Image: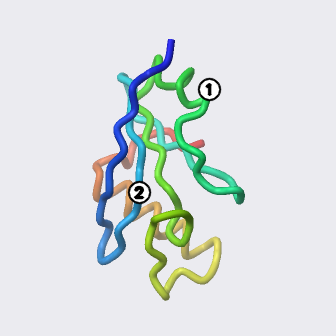
Amino acid sequence: MAISFEEQTIKIGDTSIKMFKGGSGDPLLLLHGASGNRGPLQYANALAENYTVYLPTHPGFGDSEKPDWIQSVADMASFYTWFQHELDLEESRVI
């Protein structure tokens, strides 16, 4: 069964990013790979049966803005720490 995902634009600091959110249950932050965010594919739908899935588009990918300060994987990790804090997802699983 396909879960309905809502596409949102959220602002973290001064950076707007696109995100899909869907499902129910404990929060799960699902990060896409180097090919970009292709939306809630079959695996995201399966996870959304048991979790509330947050599927953001990384800064600089797709329609998400890229702040100048993100120059490395460590910077991206800092961004997602901030993301989790802003959305009260500090205790979420991340995959």
Label 1 amino acid? Gln
Comes first in the chain, label 2 or label 1 = 2
Q: Which of 41 and 58 is in front in this view?
A: 41
- As displayed, is residue 3 above or below residue 40? above
Is 40 placed left or right of 73 in the picture? left
How many numbered marks, from 0 up?
2
Residue farthest to the top?
1
Mark 2 residue crowding within 10 angstroms, few (<14) / some (14–19) / many (20+): many
Residue designated by label 1: 42
* Residue 50 at x, y percent in the picture: 46, 18
Label 2 amino acid? Lys
- As displayed, is residue 75 above or below residue 26? below
Quadrant location, the C terminus: top right
Is 54 placed left or right of 76 in the picture? left
Q: Which of 28 and 42 is in front in this view?
A: 42
* Residue 90 at x, y percent in the picture: 38, 49
* Residue 71 at x, y percent in the picture: 60, 83
- As displayed, is residue 87 above or below residue 20? below
* Residue 91 at x, y percent in the picture: 39, 42
Is 39 placed left or right of 33 in the picture? left
Residue farthest to the bottom?
68
Q: Residue at x 57, y 49 (%)?
A: 31
Residue designated by label 2: 18
Q: Residue at x 43, y 42 (%)?
A: 54
Q: Residue at x 30, y 73 (%)?
A: 13
Residue farthest to the right?
34
Q: Distance between the residues labelled 2 and 1?
A: 19 Å
Mark 1 residue crowding within 10 angstroms, few (<14) / some (14–19) / many (20+): few
Which element type, helix, strand or loop, lies under badge 1?
Answer: helix
Q: Which residue is drawn at 44% across and 21% down?
A: 3
- As displayed, is residue 82 above or below residue 72? above
